[in-house]
Image (tube, rainbow, N blue to C red):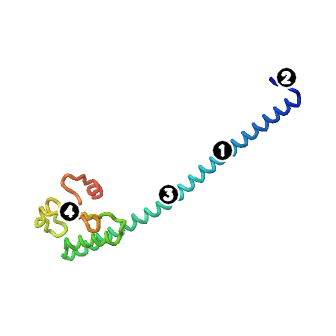
Amino acid sequence: MLKNLKVQTKIIVLVSASIILSFAIIFSIILINLYNSGLNQAQTLAFEVSKGNAIDVKEDFTLVEKLGKGLGISIEKYRKKGIANRQAVIDMQKQILKSDESIFGIAVAYEPNIFDGKDQEFVGQSWYGSNGEFIPYITRDGNGYNIEPAYTESSDKRWYNETKK
């Protein structure tokens, strides 16, 4: 094909092809570098955002842990003084939910007759276990609260039994 062309035309075609090929190679290298740079920036951004979110989640868990421990200490002080009051504990649970909108629900669960020795008086009543155990679980319900037993006889209580070990 190039045999019939003048030398000047052959040179122009070869130089043009070389220039086009050089531009294609340079353009490809630039695109690859842009892609790698964008990928590295995205990974760095994702890492930084997840690190910030991890700090927020840790702070939330720390707050909830402190609230739970504080509630437990308060309840035990009253219980050991012999002034255990089921309604007062439920009111404390509601107060915690009222004070922190990020907490959806809170449970208190006592072994049978450990809280106040009065489980028998509460058999068959809502908010209590089937044998009257003091196990209120309080959740938000619109502007009010929903109170139910933290578990039932058919519940899988691994969350409780495993930590008890």
Q: Amino acid at mark 1?
A: Ile
Task: State whether residue 108 appears in this view.
Answer: no
Task: State whether residue 44 appears in this view.
Answer: yes
As displayed, is residue 77 above or below residue 5? below
Q: Which residue is mark 3?
A: 50
x then y, percent, for residue 81? 21, 77
Please report the residue visible at 30 percent of the width from the left and 58 percent of the height from the top.
163
**The N terminus: image quadrant:** top right
- Between circles 4 and 2, the one closer to the viewer is 2
- Per the image, label 2 sits on a secondary structure element best described as helix
Q: Amino acid at mark 3?
A: Ser
Task: Rate crowding at label 1 as few (under 14), some (14 to 19) or many (20 or more) other CA atoms within 10 Å.
Answer: few
- Between circles 4 and 1, the one closer to the viewer is 1
Q: Amino acid at mark 2?
A: Asn
In the rendered structure, which disc, 4 or 2, sits on the residue that comes first in sequence? 2
Please report the residue visible at 17 percent of the width from the left and 60 percent of the height from the top.
129
In the rendered structure, which disc, 2 or 1, sits on the residue that comes first in sequence? 2
Task: Please say if the residues under marks 2 and 1 sit with CB atoms less than 8 Å apart.
Answer: no
- Between circles 2 and 1, the one closer to the viewer is 2
Q: Which residue is mark 1?
A: 32
Q: Which residue is mark 2?
A: 4
Residue 160 in which image quadrant:
bottom left
- Per the image, label 1 sits on a secondary structure element best described as helix
In the rendered structure, which disc, 4 or 3, sits on the residue that comes first in sequence? 3
As displayed, is residue 39 above or below residue 104? above
x then y, percent, for residue 114? 18, 66
- Per the image, label 3 sits on a secondary structure element best described as helix
